[in-house]
Image (tube, grey):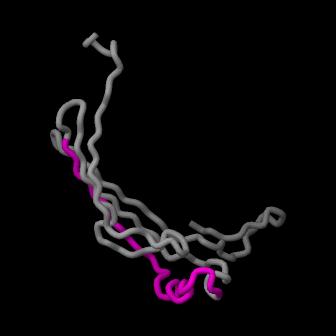
Amino acid sequence: MYPVEYDKYTDQNNEKYLKYRRKHSGVLSLDTQMKRTTIGFSLFMRSRILDIDKIFKTTSILPGFGEYWAGHNRGYATIDGNVGYMINEKFTLSLAVKNLTNTEYMGRPGDIQPQRSFSVRFSGKIRPAGYGNDG
């Protein structure tokens, strides 16, 4: 990405980066299915935030944020994983792990993202009455 200010009158940019933007981001997802089992991994990568409003770094609006920002505004990568098992044609049981590497990162200033989390999902497909050949 090239997040810079653009002047619509001169039809040029001024090389000044927009606040709250990152230069680089990427996602890589791999999923596979073997018979009734599905497995997947996703890698999310983001570079550091280029700039924020000065008020957040120099005032007590968010106590301690200026120091935290100075030491923690860096790029990061996280990995999510999931595994699922199709019990039958209608029901699936899945386990998902978000932030497998337990990385501490900021999605945006002052918004420290959660640690590793686990979730279990039981899902099903319901077919309306009269759908298909089962009357």
Q: Is residue 103 left or right of residue 38?
A: right
Give residue 91's position: percent from left, percent from top: 23, 35
Q: Is residue 59 left or right of residue 29?
A: right
Give residue 56's position: percent from left, percent from top: 63, 81
Q: Quadrant of the C terminus?
A: top left
Give residue 53's position: percent from left, percent from top: 66, 78
Is 24 contained in the magenta span? no
Q: Residue at the location (31% across, 67% down)? A: 116
Q: Residue at the location (58% across, 77% down)? A: 50
Q: Residue at the location (43% across, 69% down)? A: 113
Q: Is residue 114 above or below residue 118?
A: below
Q: Is residue 114 above or below residue 37?
A: below
Nearer to us in this view, 12 or 105: 105
Q: Is residue 124 left or right of residue 23?
A: left
Residue span colored magenta: 59-85
Q: Residue at the location (38% across, 71% down)? A: 77
Residue 82 location, quadrant: bottom left
Give residue 27's position: percent from left, percent from top: 41, 60
Is 64 contained in the magenta span? yes
Q: Is residue 109 above or below residue 130?
A: below
Q: For the view shown, which residue lies furthest in the right direction?
A: 9
